Image (cartoon, helix red, strand yellow):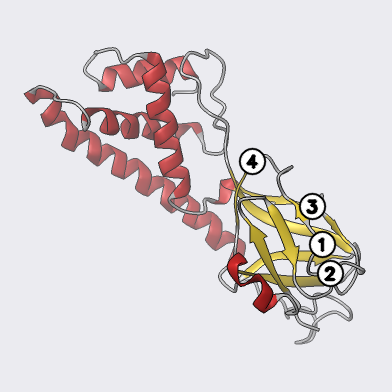
Amino acid sequence: MITKGTELYNFLTQLNGGATIDVSLANILISNAKAILEEERPWNVLLKTDTTKVVSASGTWQTAIDLSTITDLSRIYVTSDGTALKIFDGENRVEYYTLKPFDQRLEFKDSSHTCVYDENAKILYLNGKPPFSGNIWLTYLATSAEVDLEDSATIAWPVFPSRFLPILAYYAIGIHKGAVDYDSINRQMLPSNQAVLNAIKNAMESWDNEKSLGAIQSNDPTDGYGGGFRSGAINRYD
């Protein structure tokens, strides 16, 4: 079982036929592999919710909400129904907001329950006028800590189970071998390594799919309330 940076580096070397890769280059390759993998889909284990931002009922479409303080924010997570965030009053009321393109900010400035995000400045704006004061519940895809191959401590990539860690080495070796002129032995190893990489990735995706399925199956918001909603709770657009 690989759990430490030094162990992952040793495994990377073994995959490379015993030839050592400069550790600085290896760290960059692993970082590239991690970035590719994490950005391929909205992994459940990378989802986080920030509730530190507060809105006031007196706010306007020009009230800036600074998201730069959420230092691990990669991108805002938008659900299949378009929901990008919620405002919660601390009791029963929840209001949902959908994300609109920032370059169409003026067109949507008076459209309640919509928002825009300035990626460059890391500023969020709620269009229209907030229906009440409360906290923003913002779910986002987080970035994870970099892996240090010289660190003998447990790898700071806790978002995935350790059994999936070898995939980073397979990715990194694939990038490395594809960029240099290797001998026939290494060339023959590539299809086998690619097959293992794909198998591990398929296992990760199946694991993640089951997490998603478990969160949504048998989820009927009207169950238990006589076919209706609780009074004053989760009124989507009123």
Distance, label 3 to label 4, CA atoms, is: 14 Å
Residue at (53% x, 28% y) in the render: 146
Query: Which callout, 2 or 4, points to the residue nearer the camera?
Result: 2
Residue 60: assigned label:
2
Check disc 3 and report its element: helix, strand or loop. loop
Q: Left or right? Give the position of 80 relative to 137.
A: left
Q: Where is residue 154 shown, x and y percent of the image?
A: 56, 20
Residue at (56% x, 51% y) in the render: 44
Dot 2 or dot 4: first in sequence order is: 2
Q: Where is residue 187 shown, x and y percent of the image?
A: 12, 29
Residue 72: assigned label:
4
Query: Which callout, 1 or 4, points to the residue nearer the camera?
Result: 1
Give 218 or 82, whichever is nearer the viewer: 82
Name the residue type under label 2: Thr
Residue identifier under label 1: 63
Give 104 or 203, whichever is nearer the viewer: 104
